Image (spheres, rainbow, N blue to C red):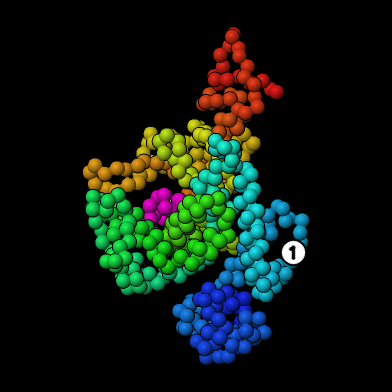
Amino acid sequence: MAAKQGLFIGPRLRRIRRDLGLTQADMAADVGISAPYVALMERNQRPVTADMLLRLARTYRLDVSELAGEDEDNQLARIQEMLKDPILSDIDVAPIEVAELVNTNPGLGDVLLRLHNAYREGQLMLADQRVENRNGEDDRDPVADVRRFVSARKNSFPTIDNTAERLASTVAENGGLAAHLASRHQLRVRRLPPDVMGGSIRRLDRHRHELLIDEGLSPASYTFQLAQQLAHLELSREISVALEEGTFGSEGSERLARRTLASYAAAAIVMPYAAFARAAESRRYDIELLSSQFGASFEQVAHRLTTLQKAGQERVPFFFIRIDTAGNVSKRLDGADFPFARHGGGCPLWNVHTTFQRPGEIQTQWLELPDGQRFFSVARTVSSGVGGFGQPKVQRAVALGCAAEHASRLVYARGSDGASPTPIGVTCRLCQRDDCAARSEPPIGRQILLDDYRRTRAPYGFSDK
């Protein structure tokens, strides 16, 4: 319906009123109409006019887009994406039916999306190898819980992205993050030496109205910490709504998920979705150029690239992994259907494990799994910690990759289309390659054959049964 005739947004109006803790009579008194009229608008029996939209926005300090339909567009795109799931492929749902559902029953749309996310989380949980504790019960690992939560949503949280994008615009108008924190939250940003910070890199002192930041942080890390604090202050509601859709095994899991989403929101403030997605395409996913443009680190940009899967505005689907020198995985994002090892070490033939020999240098590699799937990987070492003599620093390696069919869109794959892929496995215990000299242990289900007369290049020989 045309804007001058009004919008039928009853369910959203009811949700906002309830979120504000208001009765229909309260809202009616606030905006100067009768309570029965509020009830009619919430039941979609009366449209919300443009004048009423502005009154509601001014009265409750809301963004007009929060009232006027952006959520429906997001929900429509998400439900259309949900219907592509193979389990639903035999159900013919016309686009007009989806649009009608979103317009008239957005709450039911939320129910469908939440059920589908729960289903995907359950599938990921079944795929995981479970660890048993001494009592024989499931040991719910908070890190695994959060990985499932993020993976089930393809590391994409559109509501957080949309709100962060609007917030980023306001921050720019106010003169930057520090100025915005001062004007909006009366917080003065101070940078202090590491010994004064007492092991913290960021600390909010509400009593003194100060945000304390370790002065040894790099410019990109400093900016990110300001954005993360701002996310906790102004995107708490959006983060809480996203968490309500998750299934967590413990309070610790949910707290870790909240921190993860706060980091997601911080990246969305520093690298707003639309601008970042356009830049990524125009610069052919050159991570270093994007780092310079947005004032972010190599790792922050690589991580942000995995989040560009907003329904209807998707870019290259990437996977991401971060490891230390011992091969321990500290971050993993399954955004391109790459079969990461859930437990144990990865394949040593993947050059993410050898980047430590050439610190700071970008290394590329074509990969081929035993089943024939091919991927393209970009890997480099990164450092974290604070500057200054004697301050601890940690060196890790990160790898960003995509399926082979998307590699031509990356600047890193230019001229390498004919390169032979490196044959790798998920992990030795799940890899059935017979001739791998890098193998550290035999695969599950294969019997070792001992040969007293011949020593092959591979450390083990196996029977075919």
Residue for point 24% across, 46% down: 388
Res 342 visible: yes
Q: In which quarter of the image is the C terminus?
A: top right
Res 16 visible: no
Magenta span contains residue 294: yes
Nearest the viewer among 447 and 433 is: 447
Instruction: Using a 10 Å C-alpha cutoff, classify the residue at mark 1 as few (fewer than 14 neighbours), some (14 to 19) or many (20 or more).
Output: few
Query: Residue 432's quadrant in the figure?
Result: top right
- Mark 1, residue position: 93
Magenta span contains residue 263: no
Nearest the viewer among 308 and 255 is: 255
Task: State the predominant SS element of the stretch in magenta.
Answer: helix
Residue extending farthest to the top is: 453
Q: What's the amino acid at mark 1? A: Val
Q: In which quarter of the image is the N terminus?
A: bottom right
Label count reads 1
Residue for point 45% across, 43% down: 330
Nearest the viewer among 228 and 318 is: 228
Q: Where is residue 265 in the image (x, y as percent from the top left)?
A: 45, 61
**Is residue 27 depicted above or below 320 in this figure?**
below
Residue for point 62% across, 76% down: 11
Task: Determine whether the residue tagged by mark 1 lies in a helix, strand or loop.
Answer: loop
The range drawn in magenta is: 290-305
**Is residue 444 depicted above or below 272 in this figure?**
above
**Is residue 212 depicted above or below 28 in this figure?**
above
Residue for point 58% across, 25% down: 442
**Is residue 379 depicted above or below 159 in this figure?**
above
Nearest the viewer among 112 and 76 is: 112
Q: Where is residue 427 in the image (x, y as percent from the top left)?
A: 55, 33
Q: Position of residue 254 (x, y in %)?
A: 50, 55
